[in-house]
């Protein structure tokens, strides 16, 4: 692997633990101003020091992320769909590769929609990005299955999606946690990270999911709602870091969450 590609991957997946905590803030590209990310700059700022990589869209990056940050950026470069439109799977590439380079990204990300009428189109999107990524040494993260396709959230389907993404050259695959998740990871020859999905009932539930995913071979999380829709997002991301990087059990991570939460409650308003 070329030095530039290796260097960018090492900025995302930390060499000391082989793991990563990515923070997904790209949801607005098809979901609009959803709850707790209406003001992306305000959501992102306190979390940035605690994520290994931030995953925004181009618009959010330019408007809402301090360019002085040294946090690597995995730029969402697919879209063209919306929750109000016809078919969520109908995505194209939305960012010129040259602009991604200008933005100094560590990786680019897109969604693929295996098993839909837009399968071919989105898999060719992936191939096009991998070709450009190979030219410039920029890794590609493929996100499998969102929207309606999540109804097929089982190991058989996600294993198929992840393997196809890896076969087409994705350097990292992002998918959803499911029963028999080890089958998904074992069938995928590149690192797998999990999305959090819709906010779970409790923070502990999200910690358990992250823990189980790591135990079953994921290299980390690329989580959004379960972090920034928590009432205590910074304690939450710090607890998730303990699970991902230090192998903390969910109960241990939850103790840390509770401790950080009570410290946050004692802070004067406005600080
Ligand atoms: C979906 O296509 C987006 O990439 C989201 O960023 C992704 O689903 C991860 O966010 P969450 O943890 O909120 O599911």
Image (cartoon, rainbow, N blue to C red):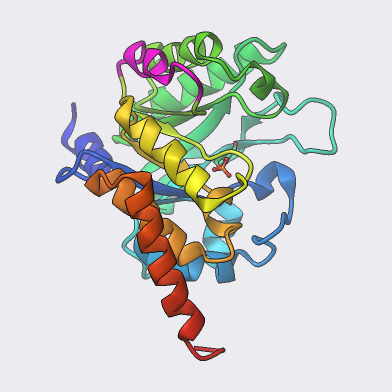
Q: Is residue 104 visible?
A: no
- Dividing the picture into quarters, in which one does residue 30 lie? top right
For the residue pair 85 and 188, the one nearer the viewer reads as: 188
| Residue numbers of the magenta segment | 178-189
User: What percent of the width, then of the height, locates residue 75?
Assistant: 48, 45
**Position of residue 111 measured from the top left corner of the image (x, y, whole percent):** 57, 29
Instruction: From the viewer's perspective, tell me whether residue 256 is left or right of residue 148.
Output: left
Q: Residue at x 35, y 15 (%)?
A: 188
Q: In the image shown, does 136 or 63 lie closer to the viewer?
A: 63
Give the x, y percent position of residue 152: 64, 16
> Between residues 265 and 30, which one lies in front from this camera angle?
265
Q: Seen in the image, is 259 located left or right of residue 226?
A: left
Label tally = 0
The picture quadrant for ligand 1 comes to top right
Residue in the image at 52% along x and 54% along y = 227
Q: Is residue 80 above or below residue 164?
A: below
Spot occupied by residue 4 in the image (x, y as percentages of width and height): 22, 39
Residue that appears at 74% across and 28% down = 88
Membership of 36 in magenta stretch: no
Asked whether residue 64 is in view, the answer is yes
**Residue 188 falls inside the magenta stretch:** yes
In the rendered view, tell whether residue 118 sits above or below residue 36: above
56 and 144: which is toward the camera: 144
In the rendered structure, the answer to whether residue 250 lies left or right of residue 7 reads right
The residue depicted at 67 percent of the width and 45 percent of the height is 29
> Is 187 rendered above or below residue 254?
above
Q: Quadrant of the N terminus?
A: top left
């Amino acid at each position: 692997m070329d030095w530039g590609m290796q260097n960018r991957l090492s900025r995302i997946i930390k060499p000391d633990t082989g793991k990563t905590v990515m923070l997904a803030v790209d949801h607005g590209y098809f979901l609009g101003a959803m709850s707790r990310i209406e003001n992306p700059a305000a959501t992102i700022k306190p979390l940035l020091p605690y994520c290994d990589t931030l995953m925004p869209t181009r618009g959010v990056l330019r408007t809402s992320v301090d360019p002085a940050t040294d946090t690597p950026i995995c730029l969402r470069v697919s879209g063209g769909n919306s929750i109000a439109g016809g078919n969520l799977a109908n995505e194209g590439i939305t960012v010129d590769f040259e602009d991604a380079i200008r933005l100094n990204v560590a990786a680019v990300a897109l969604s693929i929609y295996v098993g839909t009428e837009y399968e071919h189109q989105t898999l060719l999107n992936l191939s096009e990005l991998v070709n450009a990524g190979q030219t410039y040494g920029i890794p590609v993260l493929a996100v499998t299955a969102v929207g309606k396709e999540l109804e097929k959230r089982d190991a058989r389907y996600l294993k198929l999606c992840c393997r196809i993404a890896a076969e087409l050259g994705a350097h990292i695959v992002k998918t959803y946690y499911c029963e028999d998740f080890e089958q998904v990871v074992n069938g995928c020859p590149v690192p797998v990270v999990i999305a959090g999905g819709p906010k779970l009932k409790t923070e502990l539930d999200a910690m358990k999911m992250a823990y189980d995913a790591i135990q079953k071979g994921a290299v980390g999380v690329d989580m959004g709602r379960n972090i920034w829709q928590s009432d205590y997002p910074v304690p939450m991301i710090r607890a998730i870091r303990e699970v991902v990087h230090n192998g903390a059990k969910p109960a241990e991570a939850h103790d840390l969450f509770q401790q950080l939460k009570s410290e946050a409650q004692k802070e004067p308003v406005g600080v």
